[in-house]
Amino acid sequence: MHLIMRAHWFMVPLLAALLAGCGGKVPQLARIGAGDVIVAFGDSLTYGTGAAEHESYPAVLAQLIGRTVVRSGVPGEVTAQSLQRLPEVLDEHKPKLVIVCLGGNDMLRKISEAETIANLRAIVRQVKASGAHAVLIGVPRLALLTSAPKFYEDIATEFGIPYDGATVTGVLYKPEYKSDPIHPNAQGYRKIAEALAELLRKAGAV
């Protein structure tokens, strides 16, 4: 009985993560051409901490979809710092699409949820104002590893952009996909890239 109960509780967070990522029709994006640039914008999860550079999710995603994906991840960065960095990134790369994966460090540093939400909204707004499209990735509260907070989904709904709230949680919940308690390994980053490639296909971007 004890083993059965443990198995049950093991599955609860993963099920919650999967449900968080399930929704209705994926918002559609303009097609990303062969000469267009995608920027993966975020923190250590985007940088690829825990794996080699060519094993990071942006590098693997580029291989999967046959498009240029710029890895613009800064380990340890909080959303306020990302917001300050974004204009230079947009100006330098002039992307057609920006994949935003941020917020984990805000939670680790106990930054108020209201501030994180405001910064994420400002980031998405700035991306769209530049003429680029945005995709949002939700990350879990690392102390719980249940599901991404609902505010990610709310922001994605507000701006009408594609959203994945399940994949990072699912990866970080499985020891075989992790290099340390809060970062994926090469296999985990590949899972993230595969999920994003599928999301972009459903959104009509590739």
Image: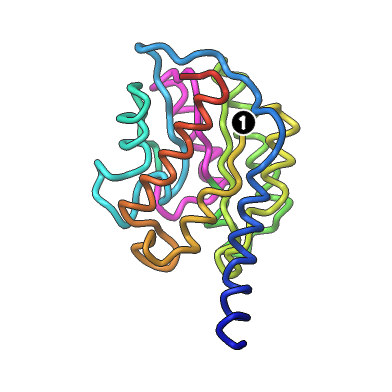
Q: Is residue 191 above or below residue 37?
A: below
Residue 54 locus on image (x, y percent): 24, 41
32 sits left or right of 2 in the view? left
Does residue 200 show up magenta in the picture? no
User: SS class of the residue under badge 1?
Assistant: loop
The residue at 62%/73% (across/down) is 8
Q: Position of residue 32 (x, y in %)?
A: 45, 15
Q: Quadrant of residue 159?
A: top right
Note whether 148 is above or below 146 in the view shown. Answer: above
Residue at 58 percent of width and 37 percent of height: 136
Taking the spot 40% from the left edge, 59% from the top edge, the residue there is: 183
Q: Which residue is mark 1?
A: 162
Toward the viewer: 98 or 162? 162
Q: Nearer the viewer, residue 153 or 65?
A: 65
Residue at 66 percent across and 42 percent down: it is 22
Q: Amino acid at mark 1?
A: Pro
Which portion, as a residue range, is magenta? 74-101
